[in-house]
């Protein structure tokens, strides 16, 4: 997949600095055109995917780095401090996908006790390089968000 296509879509969907609500509820686009100092915030359960630039977060004395091609998962509301690394020529571009606790609980119940017995210790916060399937899904989501009709019809499934 082309990073250039992801950046192109993000620049179009988030034309100005700050947070931009997308056409799909629960999906927020982020853009920073310059570095932002470490700032405390309360993050809600979400998946934060960084397309370009870099973010650094601190929680419980641990540093989490998530830059271009990485994502951060927060499974519960957490106090979190973040710093953004960006520039006019290469803004930080990302999207946050809010996690609906009710849907997660429903999915867990459908998976049943067997899956829970095989699961590792739950993690409330982690950063990881993006896998190809998630990267492909991110591109499909951004392409759908570029069209009001596709956002309405395909967005929730993506």
Image (cartoon, helix red, strand yellow):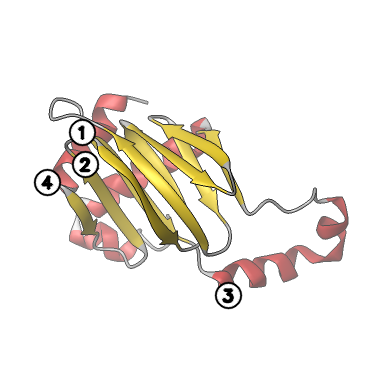
Q: Is residue 81 left or right of residue 117?
A: left
- Work out whether mark 4 precedes mark 2 in sequence or the reverse, and give the earlier one: 4
- Marks 2/3 in contact by CB < 8 Å: the verdict is no
The residue to which callout 3 is attached is 102
Q: Residue 91, which numbered label?
A: 1
- Work out whether mark 3 precedes mark 4 in sequence or the reverse, and give the earlier one: 4
Q: Secondary structure at mark 4?
A: loop
- Give the CA separation, mark 4 to mark 1: 11 Å
The one of 13 and 83 positioned closer to us in this rendering: 83
- Give the CA separation, mark 4 to mark 2: 10 Å
Counting from the top left corner in percent of width and height, residue 128 is at 55, 35
- Work out whether mark 2 precedes mark 3 in sequence or the reverse, and give the earlier one: 2
Q: Secondary structure at mark 3?
A: helix
Q: How packed is label 4: few (under 14 Cα within 10 Å), some, or many (20 or more)? A: few
Q: Secondary structure at mark 1?
A: loop
Q: How packed is label 1: few (under 14 Cα within 10 Å), some, or many (20 or more)? A: many
Q: Residue at x 86, y 51 (%)?
A: 118
- Give the CA separation, mark 3 to mark 4: 32 Å
Q: How packed is label 3: few (under 14 Cα within 10 Å), some, or many (20 or more)? A: few
Q: Is residue 110 visible?
A: yes
- Marks 4/2 in contact by CB < 8 Å: the verdict is no
Q: Residue at x 33, y 35 (%)?
A: 51
- Give the CA separation, mark 2 to mark 3: 31 Å
Counting from the top left corner in percent of width and height, residue 20 is at 21, 57
**Number of callouts:** 4
The residue to which callout 2 is attached is 32
Q: Residue 15, which numbered label?
A: 4
- Work out whether mark 2 precedes mark 1 in sequence or the reverse, and give the earlier one: 2
Q: Is residue 46 visible?
A: no
- Marks 2/1 in contact by CB < 8 Å: the verdict is yes
Q: Residue at x 18, y 48 (%)?
A: 13
- Work out whether mark 4 precedes mark 1 in sequence or the reverse, and give the earlier one: 4
């Amino acid at each position: 997949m082309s990073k250039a296509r992801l950046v192109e879509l993000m620049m179009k969907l988030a034309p100005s600095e700050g947070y931009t609500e997308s056409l799909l509820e629960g999906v927020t686009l982020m853009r920073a055109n310059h570095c932002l100092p470490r700032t405390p915030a309360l993050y809600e359960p979400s998946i934060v995917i960084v397309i370009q630039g870099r973010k650094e977060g601190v929680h419980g004395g641990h540093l989490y780095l998530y830059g271009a091609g990485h994502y951060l998962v927060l499974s519960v509301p957490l106090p979190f401090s973040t710093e953004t690394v960006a520039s006019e020529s290469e803004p930080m571009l990302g999207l946050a996908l809010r996690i609906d606790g009710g849907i997660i609980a429903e999915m867990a119940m459908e998976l049943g006790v067997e899956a829970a017995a095989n699961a590792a210790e739950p993690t409330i916060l982690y950063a990881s390089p993006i896998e190809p399937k998630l990267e492909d899904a991110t591109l499909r989501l951004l392409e759908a968000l570029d069209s009001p009709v596709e956002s309405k019809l395909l967005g929730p499934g993506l």
